[in-house]
Image (cartoon, grey):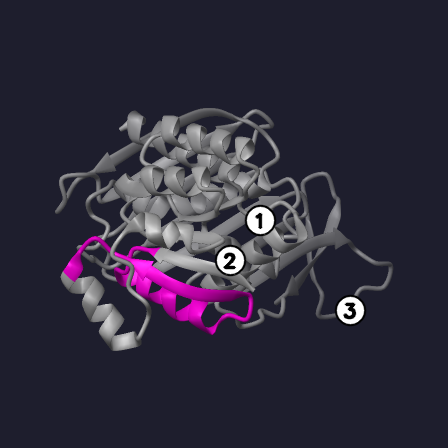
Amino acid sequence: MLKVGVLGAGHLGKIHLKLLNQSTKYELVGFFDPFAENAQKVADEFGYKLFKDVSDLINSVDVVDIVTPTLSHFDCAREAILAGKHVFIEKPITNTLEEAEALRTLVSQNHVKGQVGHVERFNPAFTAVKDVIDNPMFIECHRLAEFNPRGTDVPVVLDLMIHDIDIILSVVNSKVSNVSASGVSVISETPDIANARIEFENGCVANLTASRISLKNMRKTRFFQKDAYISVDFYEKKSEVVKMKDVPENPDEFAMILQNAEGIKKQIYFENPTVEANNAILDELETFAEAIENNTTPIVTLGDGTKALRVAHQIINSF
């Protein structure tokens, strides 16, 4: 088992602590949180070992799980990597692109592994259909959330939209050619609502909308590709695949058949893939452990996290 320590015991940090404590892949050594009162409360309530110094925790583990505010990601990860420790970093990877690139270099130089917590990659609704997504040419994303003060210190792009940016970059095998966007600040000092259009060199276009002041929660993405449409509901954990195939010689009388202007007929098939229930956060943490143990590439690399951050900043700069 890999010895792991957690930096940060806020809302998400406590979830990581609980899951790591349950995991069969890790031995939870303890945690550090700079806010003494909160740290002691977590230690007393759950019995996790509280470290009074970051360096002491880092030197006691194999893996450092960084669940601190984004502004401190770089400093925490840098110290851990230089100490020869593997790092799991919550999204976004860092505050700036320069910091992200520096961490990528440090990981390579120190022969350790790093993973970024883009948890939607492990959402069962997405994993159920990701192998069906093949060269999508139009993607539409809606990620709406009810207002929560937590996370409003950064634009909604870094808070919510970055999840969809990462998903899109993971399925579109082409470079970004153009980004345009608009954002509006309603209740925060940074934009609470944003819409972005990402264009790729292969002609694919992605349209993303994110809001953190919605009256309801929604996390839906639709992928359109040749002869297929794939819908993923990240919130409800549901997927649907609609495929069009050439009409057979003797179609069923209830078959849904479309005919285009050229007279070509296609039959529509509806599929509802089996979505296996899981804990996406536990899965991302445990697959990272497997990557370390088997010396394989993590599912969401620091390079992936850097690409998502780069596009996120392009969107923010377009406002």
Mark 2 / mark 3, whichever is N-terminal: 3
Q: CA distance from mark 2 to mark 3?
A: 43 Å
Residue tagged by mark 3? 252
- Return the mark for residue 299: 1
SS category of the residue bearing label 1: loop
Residue 188 position within the rendered picture, expressed as x and y whole percent measured from the top left: 14, 44
Picture layout, residue 43 above or below residue 232? below
- Look at the image and give the residue range highlighted in magenta: 7-36
Question: As shown in the figure, which amino acid type bears the numbered disc 1?
Answer: Ile
Residue 75 position, x and y percent, is 32, 38
Q: Position of residue 118 (x, y in %)?
A: 45, 50
Residue at 24% of width from left, 50% of height from top? 151
Type of amino acid at the residue the image marks with label 3 = Asp
The quarter of the picture where residue 20 lies is: bottom left
- Provide the residue designation for mark 2: 284
Residue 167 falls inside the magenta stretch: no
Amino acid identity at mark 2: Glu
Say few, some or many: other residues with alpha carbon within 10 Å of mark 3 (under 14 / 14 to 19 / 20 or more): few
Quick check: 12 left or right of 302?
A: left
Q: Is residue 160 visible?
A: yes
Q: What SS does tag 3 mark?
A: loop
Q: For the C terminus, give its image quadrant.
A: top left
Q: State the image quarter where residue 19 is shown.
A: bottom left
Q: Which residue is at the front of the view, 317 or 290?
A: 290
Q: On residue 123, which mark appears? A: none
User: What residue is at 49 percent from the left and 42 percent from the top?
Assistant: 84
Position of 252 compared to 1: left or right? right
For label 2, the crowd category at 10 Å Cα-Cα, with few meaning under 14, some 14 to 19 and many 20 or more, is many
Contact between labelled residues 1 and 2, with CB atoms less than 8 Å apart: yes
Q: Would you say 224 lies left or right of 219 here?
A: right
Residue shown at the point (55%, 71%) measured from the top left: 24
